[in-house]
Image: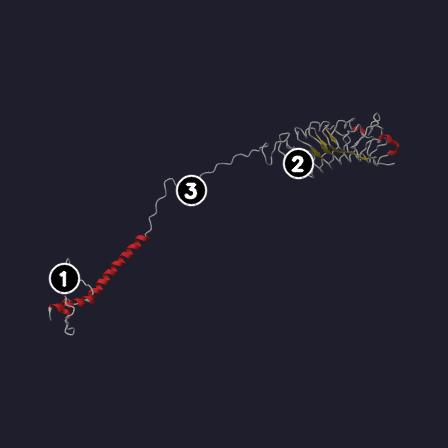
Amino acid sequence: MSVQSLTMALAMVLVFLGPHPSVAAPPGEPEDEAFDLENYDLNSEMDWENLDTTIYGDSYDYDDLDQEVRRREGIKHYYRIDLNIEVGTVAPETPPPANQPTAEHYEEELTLPTLPPAPVTLDFKGPGLFGPETGLGMPTCLLCVCIGGSVYCDDMGLDHIPPLPKDTTRLYGRFNKIRHVKNTDFINLNKLQSIDLTGNQISGMDEDVFRSLPQLKELLLADNNLQVMPELPVTMKHIDLRNNRLISRGVHPKGFKDMSQLEFLYLSNNNLDYIPTPLPLGLRVLHLQNNNIQSLHEDTFCNSRDLNFIRRNLEDIRLDGNPLNINLFAQAYVCLPRLPVGSH
């Protein structure tokens, strides 16, 4: 067999078996120099039946191949384990900053000794249960209900008027057991406009009890036991003294004369002998039924010296229930837009 034939056979074996360290070219020597492929005779005949492959190099050891595979797999497994360790490793806990409070710090704060409570003082001038300050500087709204400027003391069993806030505008003290009203009950209440003491047992009042109220417009004292009407400010607009025991000498002479704003005057069911005059021109309603009135003066409603005088506002006069025949005193109401109601 020629050299060319052997070289050809060796090349064929290398094609089928692939590169292997045992049959590779010597290190540092290029493969194209180890095999002169330009001088190969590809057309020569090869005796394939009698070809001895062992002459071309050592036989391939498959046990070495298994060891090499296992070695490489072990390296891969090692790197995987190392990678898992690097990724899954938990960072060590860092200590808290020096200025951050710890559990022991909170425990010390909780166990600090508590100070004794401060003494309780009542503020009569502040808002709430004990305020605002009253006319006498005393706490108020303890028994009554205070809403805005209105004070509600109805049906509380009171036997006197309680201290009122300085900003009181309306007092409702109905259906109690008050017997006497003192001049100190409304002191310094410059905003008071309405007083309703209906349904008490009032039989007496100090003379100047209402004199110091510059804005009083409404006084309701029905269903009491009054015989004397106290002096009232000229700012009055509505007076209700029904169902009392008033007598004529208990009403101040010319007591209503200067009340230019008075519109409603209720004096029914009393013991009056005559109509208190003069009456203000702005009066609209006058109820005097069920008294003891027996006569009328010609100047009670009109002006006998001025025949053209007309009292236009007074449209509701009640004189029924009195021992009086109104037909006998026609000159007394010729200036009225309507005749009074009474016995004929």
User: Which dot, 2 or 3, sits closer to the camera?
Assistant: 2
Q: Residue furthest right?
A: 328
- At horizontal 20% and vertical 66% (from top left) the residue drawn is 15
Point out which mark residue 151 bears: 2
Residue matched to label 1 = 34
- At horizontal 29% and vertical 54% (from top left) the residue drawn is 83
Q: CA distance from mark 1 to mark 2?
A: 125 Å
- Residue 32 or 264: which is nearer the viewer? 32
Point out which mark residue 202 bears: none
Location of the N terminus (image quadrant): bottom left
To which quarter of the image does residue 81 belong? bottom left
- Residue 311 or 112: which is nearer the viewer? 311
SS class of the residue under badge 2? strand
Residue matched to label 3 = 106
Mark 1 Cα within 10 Å, few/some/many (few <14, many 20+)?
few
Which of the marked residues, 2 or 3, is nearer the chain's N terminus?
3
Identified by mark 2, the residue type is Val
SS class of the residue under badge 3? helix
Q: Residue furthest top?
A: 305
Q: Give the vertical position of 105 relative to 332 (above or below).
A: below
